[in-house]
Image (cartoon, rainbow, N blue to C red):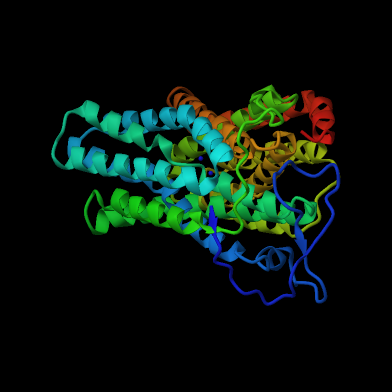
Amino acid sequence: MPPQTENQLPSSTPAPVPAPAPASDPASDAAPAPASAGRRPRSPYSRLFAVPGARAFTAGNLVARLPMGMFSVSAVIMIAGSRGSYALAGAVTATGLAATAAVAPFTARLVDRHGQARVAVPATAIAVLGSLALVLCVRFDAPDWTLFAAYAATATTPNTGGMSRARWAHLHRGDPKALHAANSFEQAADELCFMLGPVAAALLCAALFPEAGTLVGAVLLMAGILLFAAQRSTEPPPAPRTATTPSASPLRVPGMPALLTVFLATGAVFGAMEVVTVAHVGGAVLALQAAGSCAAGLLYGSRAPAASVPRRLLLCLAAMTALMTAPLLAAASTGSPLALAGALLVAGMATAPTMVTGMSLVQRLTPRGRLNEGMTLAVTALLGGIAAGSAAGGWAVEHAGATTAYAVPVAAAATALLTAAAGTRALARAARRRP
């Protein structure tokens, strides 16, 4: 959890002109952001894609990102269908998640140090080989331990979303409004991929053969990374460690531990909400939560960002906590699947603004030359929270019932809010400093 060539696409707007970078801009190793001269683009998003090469690297990244929502579902369908054990399938995917949490920050550190193209392509190739090995182990009835080993090898998959956000930070370091729009677009893309990925995986496995979802996902991942890595003109320059390059981990930056705790609690919201909703009415309505988040993210990015990022994060977390009570109330008062679907749509509308603001703050706090690592640590915390939330949600469903279990994501959201509130001053001080 996430490259470029000299291939630049023509733009319908005039050539960009560099804008001066204020001292408070997010950390990045790149040149100042371009700003359009003459006729202004109709929206912040059209301004983003007026930058030469932006469309090409975005297309490659989206192709590579879609499989992120496919692999777990495909593996569960494939392994459970072959071995007749959902417990084994769940254990294998959980092992892959744990391996990713351990390996991803090191992969991101190599990306920062040696460049996206140089690291992402071989790292993806290793991950694709792991996926192919998993298919072969399942197909030829290899011992169970080989499934764990093969799926763990996919942990080298680079954080495609993080690399794309790093490119936007490189291109727009002198333009906070453009960077805000870029982060919002990336969050909407995340929601769309994780909404469509599981559906695509299930359809492929059902319509073709059980291994189809994993195989198609592996092909898309490799093809997308190759296209993304080919766009070198927009790639942030590598930051090899020198006497003047910060060597301290982003974890040691003041305010970062508190922010990662917020991401951990936010992940617990997502994990618990998914399990509890599936237990209550099935998984189909979860797409509405992602749809609400996607729409809210695009709308949020079209608005000018507030001056104080930590205060904005606090407001977003407060909104998420309040809106997460809607599914609980709908499930408790009516029990209607239609009412719950509407409540999930509303609840999802706070997700993207919260994630966009959190990632913006990560960019502010992370030292120069460590941006991929900082964002990957945030994604790792998020994944850890999802795992913990899933476990807590499942326990609550079994011991208290599906309706009462909706209190778990509400409690997780409140925890994120309280953590951010406790660290607001420290986050604000750290955000004012340029790492």
x 65%, y 26%: residue: 247
Query: Where's residue 348, x and y in %?
Result: 61, 47
How many numbered marks, from 0 up? 0
Indicate the quadrant where residue 259 lies: top right
- Specify whether residue 382 is in view: yes
- Specify whether residue 401 is in view: no
Query: Where's residue 250, x and y in %?
Result: 66, 28
In the rendered structure, the answer to whether residue 178 lies left or right of residue 168 reads right
**Up-down: is 314 above or below 226?**
above
Which residue is farthest left?
140
Q: Observer-nearest residue: 3 or 398?
A: 3
Indicate the quadrant where residue 264 lies: top right
x 67%, y 58%: residue: 298
Q: Assign the C terminus to one quadrant of the image.
A: top right
In the rendered structure, the answer to whether residue 52 lies left or right of residue 419 reads left
In the rendered structure, the answer to whether residue 211 lies left or right of residue 353 reads left
Q: Observer-nearest residue: 65 or 367?
A: 367
Query: Where's residue 139, x and y in %?
Result: 16, 42
x 67%, y 55%: residue: 182
Query: Where's residue 185, x and y in %?
Result: 64, 56
